[in-house]
Amino acid sequence: MWRLHLCLLVALAEPFLNSKKTYEYKYEGLVRVGRELPDLVESALKMRCTFKIIGESPQTFVLQISNVDVEDFNGLPGKGVFSPSQKLTKRLSAEFSQPIVFEFSKGQITDIRTAPGVSNTVVNIVRGILGFLQVTVKTTQSFYELVELGIHGVCQSSYTVEEDSNAKELIVSQMVDITNCQQPAALYRGMALAPEDKLSKQRGESVVSTVKHTYTVKSTADGGLITKAFAQERQYFTPFNVKGGNSRLLALRDIELLKVSDTTDKIVTGQMQSRGNLIYKTEKDLRPIPVVMINLNEPMPKILDLIKRLAQANIYHVDSASSTDILNLIQLLRVATLENLEQLWKQVSGNDEHRRWFLDLVVEVTDERILKFLETRFKAGDITANEAGQALVVAFNHLSAEPVSVALAQEFLTIPFSKSHPLMWNTVVLAYGSLVYRYCVYTDPCPITVVQPLLDMATSGLSKNSEEDMVLALKALGNAAHPSSIKTLLKFLPGYTAGAEKLPIRVQSAAVQSFRLLASRDPHSVQDIVLNLFVQRTLPAEIRMLACMVLLETKPSIALISVISEVLLEETDLQVASFSYSLLKGISKSRTPDNQHLSTACNIAIKILTPKLGHLSYRYSKNVHLDWFHDDFLFGTSADIYMLQNESLIPTKLMLKGKMHFIGRILQFLEFGFRADGLKELLVGKTPQLKKGITDFATIMNILSDWQNLPKDRPLLTAYARVFGQEAFLMDVREDSIQSIIKSFSPSAGKESKVWEKIQDVQKGTSWHWTKPHLVYEARFIQPTCLGLPVEISKYYSIINAITVKAKAEINPPPKEHLGELLSSDISLHTDGFVGVTKDHFVFHGINTELFQCGTELKSKIVSALPWAFDLKINRKEQKYEMNLTPIKTVTELFSVKYVFHDYYNRGLPKGSATDVWKILQCADAKIYGTSVCIEAEAKRAHYLHEYPLYYFLGHTRFSYQLEPAEGAKPIEKIQIQVTAGRKNPPGVSEMMNLSHRVFKDTRDEITSCGENNLSNSFPASQDLDATPESVITVKALGLSPPAKPLGYEGVAFYLPTAQRDNIEMIVSDVGEEANWKMCANANTDKSQTSAKAHLRWGAECQTYDLSMRVSAACQPESKPSIYTKITWGALPSVFTMIGQRIQEYVPGISYIMGFYQKYEKNPERQAAVTVVVSSSQTFDMRVKIPERTIYKKAIPSPIDLAGFEAVNFTIST
């Protein structure tokens, strides 16, 4: 009997709707976006209505919504009032007037049906209303947890139940964990290439969401009747750490039962269509873009108008005012049909400007339409290879990775036009690999069919033994990082497949690096493979070094780091040892969250390995790692330089990589790499020829001259670039390309040369203009709220690059047969133009629908521009050059940064809050040239500046660097720069290089022997140049304002050689009748004492201030090499003195950090000295003396090999 009573209680509490009743409720929904601090603007939206639930059958019910009223708010909380939003009320009332049918059984809504014309936004609001019925009530437990379906997806819910025995009601509280849903309704877009960093999230979150529901359930004869339902949802967001200030979104939903009555009339519903269950549904095309809100009806004429306006506005300058129109244009293109795109192409393809703008931005149509459009262009051949490559790489990387899109993208691998140019074919293959990677991020398991074309390409290249095909396919497989590709990749690795060791090193290298992205997807498999490569000492050093690099990207355990350490302790190849040791050392000092545990393990390894490997110099392979991370900002950066070398003098491979760590994600922004296979072959085995070391320029040039004899199929140099971790660019520089360039610029080149053709064009007058608008990234996170409205966090970054060049030349006499004739011609060139870039960055947090937008926005704009207009006269025969520039007549902004952080509703202007305003303007006048260089800064800040990082940006900020006409200066007609070479036969580059080599060699020989012979024997008097003072070069920079005399500066350099020393003197003087300011500089090398001196004096007749320096090489008694450098000074400007004092203040701390010892002692005033003594082939000692202290350190690892200086001593003073 007790069990029966308990079952009855449970049944009576379960939410139930009687199909013969009509339930009438009142509803109020509110959403606010702000900062939870007083005196700061908030934006908000409130919707009220009443609705009826009318039974149609035991499981089918009709929802009728009426009395809709919408109000909006944008202002200071408590000081403003909500305003009626009549247009939105009218729009929603029209759609809500149509009946909505839903299926409800056992507390679950299984299907919602509406009339065909009801928008997705309205259906989602309906989901928010009906969500109050989706609750599970258990009276047998006061606390329980369930995984159940709701508007946020299939998520974990925690319930508590309290009974009000007097009112015969249950108070049910439900907390929904929407951060770890099994089937989340939240959507990420544009984040596939920025993987999550779980360790960063342990230090702080950039997004925190909470959802709580409270229900009042009254027991009735039919079952549980929900009389009240209250929901509260909060989301906190910041680009930094939510602990340090945030933007808060608050959503409240309040539903209360008004009455229950018997159903009298049936509702006629008409044609209905299913819209799914209660889970929030996102629009496929994700429109609209949150930072813009425009009318998307009839897009064709609007697209054409925008293209024309943007093209015209950016011809003569970068129009920063219209740069945000890029997003308007993208949004319009996204609603255009495929037929619209074809029609637009026909209208714009005949105009170069309009055509370029269209092709650069139509690629942001991120679904199958862009693929079909580009496929038509490829097959028709009505775009160039350059246009096709640029369009395709962006389209593939911004494409929504859906099955239909991947299938269409595969077809580009078979279109003949894709292979019409090597660089474009590389782009097509690499971009397809990137698309596969992004598709597999959201598809698990990822079908092998999507990567099969690349697997077939790799296998085919292997069977044909085509190095080029193998490398390209392997790099594309590396982009795709499909787990099923591992079996194919092993075919190219020595030790896994017979004969793989015979493949070119370049192919093996590409195979190893193909595991870089797989390192995070399948770390254990990758660890087994690359560790096996690393420990095989018979493999080439480069393969082992790359294997170690990939191994560390898998974030190995401390046990694996111990294995690496044991291998390195027994390592005999110093290239492998040096590179691997530097990798471990870099990570051991890392502060980024992703290396948090790995850095600890590497730190232990470094302590073990340093005694053996810590002394290796930069002649061996190295990795240089730098990074920083700030917990309050949850932001950091890291950079790596990888230099892989062998017995040659130049690196076999050079890679530069940069990463950004932000909002719990890691973005590998850019990576550049160079591979010098051809140059390496030239130098392999020829290092012994360099008997004089790297200063033996004649031998080096002789070796490099053999580059023409390399195999035609072997590139001299290979360059690649990765963007967001994906290889997007691959190019080989071959012998025929270099030959073509040399031939085109050769003095003997004639009319067949392209350079000749360009020179003819310049004589007639030519102009060139290029623009490149580009949406760099679009990252969106969309999550439903309890109201059915989507809260969105979006980031957009767009760029416009532009350059315009106009030029016209007069050549007298003009060349008739070959380019060499230009060397004896007078050339006058006039050119004007500009180069500029505008960068717009948006961050949005709030509600975003096609009906309205309500939220917080951070907008930043960075503008760089460099205009020019000048005349250039060249007389190569007499070595006279003259440039005439037009002075600035108006304010010209060269660089500016502006950002605004505010709340708005429906793109409304931000309303004011209590702010602090400050503004500065500082200019440095150059009145001689009629120009001022100015820095202007302005900031309007809200309160709480000192509290949180986010609030540093709250308000308006602007900074600019600009040129202005100098105030109070005489009008300047032009600025003239004259350059005249004084000697008829100045020493050539080869002569100067050989002279430098002789000085270096003889100096080294003298130091090594510690003998007393001087260098004069190496330079007999017969080699002396004329010692008569003669200017080597004269430079004048004058401001001309006829009839007044020119004003400005003149600089003259003299070369004064003697048998005992080489002297260089330079005098810079103020041009003017009463001017006496001068700067005199003198530098000389004393050949007999193997020392160099420099003396700088300036002021009135060079007498006011002076500074001197001396560097000398010497032998100490213990025959250790040393270099001694000393700086002394007399009177100095006060700013120099202040800087020197500041430096001295930091010396103790810096020296401590760098491991130097220090002691206080009285050293000579107005003097600083540093002594460096070579203590071994790998280390040196250093002693620094400044007026108040001496700092010193012994056995400092040298960045270069000092093996040639074992018997020598160098002393340096600064």
Image (cartoon, rainbow, N blue to C red):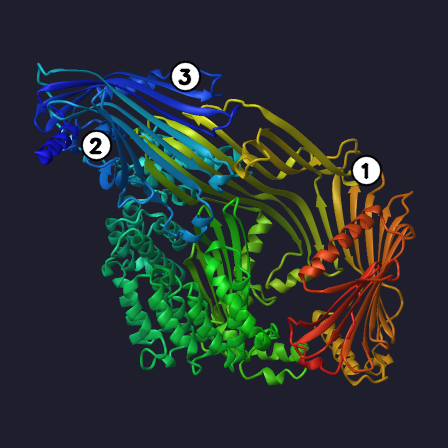
Q: Mark 2 falls on what kind of element?
A: loop
Real-space Cα distance between discs 3 and 1? 67 Å
Mark 3 belongs to which amino acid?
Answer: Phe
Of 1031 and 234, the residue lying toward us: 234
From where the camera sits, is residue 993 visible?
yes
From where the camera sits, is residue 309 visible?
no
Mark 1 belongs to which amino acid?
Answer: Pro
* Label located before the other in sequence (2 or 3): 3
Q: Mark 3 falls on what kind of element?
A: loop
Left or right: 945 with respect to 162? right
Q: Quadrant of residue 99?
A: top left
Query: Residue drawn 60% across and 47% down?
Result: 807
Q: Which mark is residue 82?
A: 3
x, y percentage for residue 202? Answer: 44, 49
Mark 1 lies on residue:
1042
Label 1: how many residues lie within 10 Å, few (<14), some (14-19) or many (20+)? few
Q: Which mark is residue 134?
A: 2
Of 378 and 492, the residue lying toward us: 492
Q: Quadrant of residue 1029?
A: bottom right
Q: Are marks 2 and 3 in contact (CB under 8 Å)?
A: no
Query: Residue drawn 61% across and 47% down?
Result: 808
Q: Are marks 1 and 2 in contact (CB under 8 Å)?
A: no
Of 662 and 162, the residue lying toward us: 162
Q: Quadrant of residue 1013?
A: bottom right
x, y percentage for residue 568? Answer: 50, 77
Which is closer to the viewer, label 2 or label 3? Answer: 2
Q: Are marks 3 and 1 in contact (CB under 8 Å)?
A: no
* Label located before the other in sequence (1 or 2): 2
Real-space Cα distance between discs 2 and 3? 31 Å
